[in-house]
Amino acid sequence: MNRDEILILTGMSGAGRSTVAHALEDLGWYVVDNLPPALLPALVSKGTGSDGKEYAVVVDVRGGHFFDELMHSLDELKRDGSAYRLLFLDATDQALVQRFESTRRPHPLQGSDRIVDGIARERAKLDEVRSQCDITIDTTNLNIHQLEKRIGEIFGGGKATGIKINVLSFGYKYGIPVDSDLVLDCRFIPNPHWIPELRPLTGLTSQVSAKVLGNPGVAEFVTRYVDLIASMVPGYMHEGKKYLMIAIGCTGGKHRSVAITQEIAKQLNAIDRGISAYPTHRDVGRE
């Protein structure tokens, strides 16, 4: 991020806002927690980043009726030409319920009802905000350390220019990542799962990778897809998008998508266009 920009952090309660706030502080950011949205324009106008720090503001439903002013404040920032990025943290309802139950704390909008009722009310409140976010992170399958690592990958290089691309492998049987910008289906490639000696291995091994990439047309397909992504990057950067999530899927997220993810990340990093790509594998070891 540019030091003249402010990061506005919001999202579902229980999705990891505190973890992200602490991770940003560890990276040297100045984090303002639970700021009433009406004060956002005043904070931005003071010239955040003039002291050499990057600034983040946590805004969430804990602010009660003050939170309802968030969209108005964002519109005001846009009218004033103020630079900001909006980071939204999300997770499935099931994951959020489990987290609230494990901490034995009520949802802030639960009242005398069930946790799921509070989650539903919060989703309705955040629906418009989520549609305008610059970065969405789905924390459903991330533990605290994985989330901290993701924040470091996205925001750790404060002075870096260009675009960061997370190439994420996944299994369709576990669901499509909700925070993906682009989704690629690799199920047209023959599945190594049906080869007995390859079944227990993953796409991270040379044996599986060679088998997947050695199928007719696959290497050319990967090269063309990388070229397509590269052609899109200047447009993304022109629109101010600094982070891109590309999800690569196969049936179980173990063989084909993993090998293709590794290769795509490798080829993207070989392109000298301000691209920084890193592979992650959501479902390896899940079976």
Image: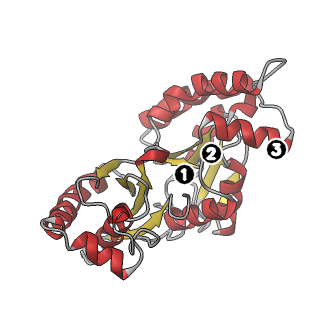
**Dot 2 or dot 3, earlier in sequence:** 2
Q: Which residue is mark 2?
A: 43
Position of residue 117 measured from the top left corner of the image (x, y, whole percent): 71, 21
Q: Report the Cα–Cα distance between label 3 and label 1.
A: 33 Å
Q: Which residue is mark 1?
A: 6
Position of residue 148 measured from the top left corner of the image (x, y, whole percent): 63, 63
Position of residue 254 measured from the top left corner of the image (x, y, whole percent): 43, 63
Q: Report the Cα–Cα distance between label 2 and label 3.
A: 36 Å
Vertical side of 142 occupied by 123: above or below: above
In the image: residue 269, left or right of residue 44:
left
Position of residue 275 measured from the top left corner of the image (x, y, whole percent): 32, 69
Viewer-closest of 157 and 279: 279
Quarter of the image with the C terminus in it: bottom right
Identify the residue at horizontal 46%, vertical 61% (top origin). Answer: 2
Residue type beneath disc 2? Leu
The crowd level at tag 2 (other Cα within 10 Å; few <14, some 14-19, many 20+) is some
Residue type beneath disc 1? Ile
Q: Is any part of residue 76 visible from this angle?
A: no
Q: Give the numbered dot on residue 271.
A: none
Q: Which residue is mark 3?
A: 102
Label 2 or label 1, whichever lies nearer to me, is 1
Identify the residue at horizontal 85%, vertical 37% (top origin). Answer: 105
Label 2 or label 3, whichever lies nearer to me, is 3
Disc 2 element: helix
Q: Which residue ends up furthest to the front in the rendered image?
A: 196
Q: Report the Cα–Cα distance between label 2 and label 1.
A: 9 Å
Disc 3 element: helix
Q: Quadrant of residue 273?
A: bottom left
